[in-house]
Amino acid sequence: MSPDVTAIREAVGWRRAPELALLALRGDDARDALLHLCPSRLFLRDAQVKESLLLDDAGRPIADVLVCADDEDYLLLVEGLSPAALRAHVEAHLPPGCAPTLEDMSETHVVVSVHGPWAWEHVSKVLGDDMMALPYLNFFRVDHGLCVRAGKTGEFGYDLVVERDAADALMADIERHGEALDGEAVSLEAVSLCRFENGFFDPAHVPVGVTPLELQLGWRLDLERDWVGKAAIEARLADGVSRRLMYVRAETPLEGTLHLNGHAVGEVVRRARSESIDAEVASALLDVEIAHGGVVLDEGARVVAPPLVENRSLHVDPRRHVFATRDEIAFPPLSRFGARA
């Protein structure tokens, strides 16, 4: 594996994440605005985080969102839109009479993301031992910002939202402590590949005309209230969903149309060489009748369900393990299919 993928899968990797836009909704109308903009169920306690989406009027996902509840205000970590595009979308879709205060925190803060089976130990060394107790999808306040525990690679993951003036000092601490954990600065491409191997939604790879229903993101939709794009989702439900996004594993690259018994049954959306399982993988929109694991297509590819990787983080317990004694852990092969140790 490349050094940065190895760092994410076996140690710890970090990077500044300029692709994340930061927008705070404040004031008496903040919650009403949030509920209209984001389609998910959003009953959040203070310091809790929830995965959601932003949809356009046609019901197409245009951004991946982490909603952070900060008392009665909300911080949105948004991937898929620039800060300017995010603000424009929000302002264009506020319900009548709703006027929250919008604060573009991308101007004052940066995000540093940390990923890996030992990311919890790394973040604890950088920010303090309290980070070890941070539950998944929650955040703690830290000096100069927030530490959000989320992650999109299948490993332990943290987004550190810090003031710009403090970012260089934070990066220096991250690099200094990371050396003792065999850590590496990693690329967006490495994070994207690890994300792809685990089946996380990526707003950079949304086929034309699909909704969360085809992307198997229906669990992020609260159909009991109104929100931007709901009418289009209800129309799609009434018409019936004909294709769903699935994963396909093969020995040779896949692209274009996929077939079963000579009939076209789907289209490849994204493909990549997975370094972790030493195989070609692709996401594909498949006819719902065959969109389940185990189907073997004419191209010799097998439909599989993510995650494709046996993530190391599943076998690391912060209460018992540390990086220095990692050899005592009986890790299984990285590939769930036995293609690679």
Image (spheres, rainbow, N blue to C red):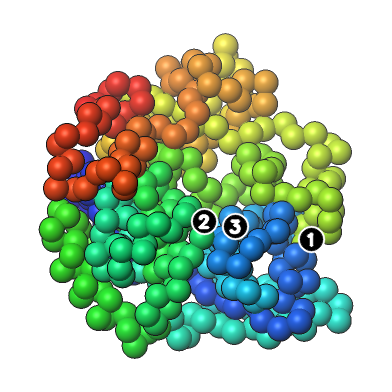
Contact? badges 3 and 2 (CB < 8 Å): yes
Identify the residue shown where x is 21% and y is 48%: 322
Q: Which mark is residue 137?
A: 2
Q: Amino acid under label 1? A: Trp
Placement of 341 over or under 245, stated as above or below:
above
Q: Is residue 279 visible?
A: no
Element type at mark 1: loop
Contact? badges 1 and 2 (CB < 8 Å): no
Element type at mark 3: strand
Q: CA distance from mark 1 to mark 2?
A: 23 Å
Q: Amino acid under label 2? A: Leu
Identify the residue shown where x is 31% and y is 28%: 335
Q: Which residue is mark 3?
A: 50
Q: Is residue 213 visible?
A: yes
Which of marks 1 and 3 precedes in the sequence? 3
State the image quarter where residue 63 is shown.
bottom right
Identify the residue shown where x is 32% and y is 36%: 315
State the image quarter where residue 91 is shown.
bottom right
Q: CA distance from mark 3 to mark 2?
A: 6 Å
Placement of 37 over or under 245, stated as above or below:
below
Q: Residues within 10 Å of mark 1 (few under 14, many from 20)?
A: many
Which of marks 2 and 3 precedes in the sequence? 3
The C terminus lies in quadrant:
top left
Considering depth in this image, is 2 or 98 the residue closer to the camera? 98
Q: Which residue is mark 1?
A: 227
Considering depth in this image, is 141 or 341 the residue closer to the camera? 141
Considering depth in this image, is 254 or 185 the residue closer to the camera? 185
Residue 232 point in image, percent of width and height: 81, 51
